[in-house]
Image (cartoon, helix red, strand yellow):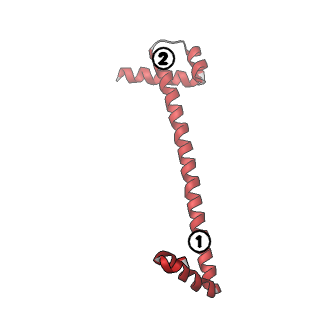
Amino acid sequence: MIAKKDPYIKSAYDQLQRISQDEQKRLEYEAREKAILDYNQGMFEAEQRGEKRGEQRGEQRGIRNTARNFLSLGVDIHVIAEATHLSIAEIEALKKEIMSDELL
């Protein structure tokens, strides 16, 4: 038997024997394992949502920076709107931000 050769496997096997003899301990063990799995899944999903949110924010920041660069080059607002898919109002707001930054 492999459990006799490897102390880690023997320890796990012994623990399994103890748990399987006492139904209450087995139920506690299963509940704990489920809680750990649920926690890990929740953390994984939260991480995925956070990454997606960060990517979206970064993409929007990049689009706005591109629009600012176009504005600083004197490109027409309608061309910028078509290229960046930003609204005319958003581009006008960026233009005002640039103008106020230049005054500082």
Q: Which image quarter holds the C terminus?
A: top left
Residue under label 2: 71
Q: Is residue 37 above or below residue 15?
A: above
Q: CA distance from mark 2 to mark 1?
A: 57 Å
**Whole-percent x and y of residue 97?**
45, 25
Tell me the residue at 52%/24% (across/down): 93
Tell me the residue at 59%/21% (across/down): 88
For the residue labelled by badge 2, is the local secondary structure a helix, a strand or a loop?
helix
Nearer-the-camera pick, 22 or 41:
22
Q: Residues within 10 Å of mark 2 (few under 14, many from 20)?
A: some
Q: Earlier in the sequence, mark 2 or mark 1?
A: 1
Q: Is residue 47 above or below residue 78?
A: below
Q: Is residue 22 above or below residue 32?
A: below
Mark 1: amino acid: Glu
**Whole-percent x and y of residue 16?**
58, 80
Residue 80 sits in quarter: top right
Tell me the residue at 52%/41% (across/down): 54
Q: Which image quarter holds the N terminus?
A: bottom right
Nearer-the-camera pick, 39 or 96:
39
Instruction: Name the mark on residue 7.
Output: none
Residue 52 sits in quarter: top right
Residue under label 1: 33
